[in-house]
Image (spheres, grey):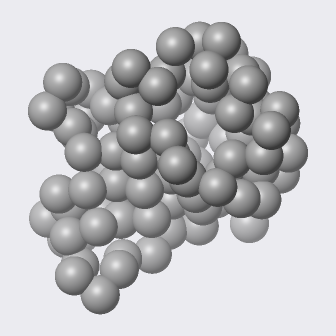
Amino acid sequence: MPIETRHLEDSQTLVISIDGRFDFSTHQAFRDAYEHCDNLVDHYVVDLSETTYLDSSALGMLLLLRDYAGGDSAKISIENCNSDVRRILSISNFEQLFAIR
């Protein structure tokens, strides 16, 4: 499955892992990952360690997650990016909107 979710031990942190391409084909699965979460989530981690490609629709999906999680007060980190993905995030100035690790 290209998108998997899991809660960390604190149960208020939701980790969304994306395997392979992060593009429009994953739109519904990505939204389902955070919208249909049973627990009260305070922090979101988007794990891109297995992500090989990211396009403009993926950037839009990250912005939708940010809006869903509270906008400017959202606690979202994007982690484990490869150099190509990190470059796209940097060019798009996403470092100003998300914690990128």
What percent of the width, then of the height, locates residue 73? 14, 32
Residue drawn at x 26%, y 56% is: 43
What percent of the width, then of the height, locates residue 15? 45, 65
Quarter of the rendering occupied by the N terminus: bottom right
Quarter of the image for residue 89 reads top right
**Left or right relative to 62: residue 59:** right
Q: Is residue 76 shown to the viewer in this render?
A: yes
Q: Nearer the viewer, residue 63 or 30?
A: 63
What percent of the width, then of the height, locates residue 16? 51, 59
Please tell me whether residue 78 is drawn above or below residue 86 in the rendered image: below
Quarter of the image for residue 57 reads top right
Q: Nearer the viewer, residue 38 or 43?
A: 43
Residue drawn at x 46%, y 25% is: 95
Q: Is residue 24 shown to the viewer in this render?
A: no
**Left or right relative to 28: residue 53:** right
Quarter of the image for residue 49 reads bottom right
Label count reads: 0
**Left or right relative to 30: residue 50:** right
Residue drawn at x 77%, y 59% is: 50
Please tell me whether residue 86 is drawn above or below residue 40 in the rendered image: above
What percent of the width, then of the height, locates residue 12? 20, 70
Residue drawn at x 59%, y 12% is: 92
* Residue at the bottom extreme, as displayed: 9
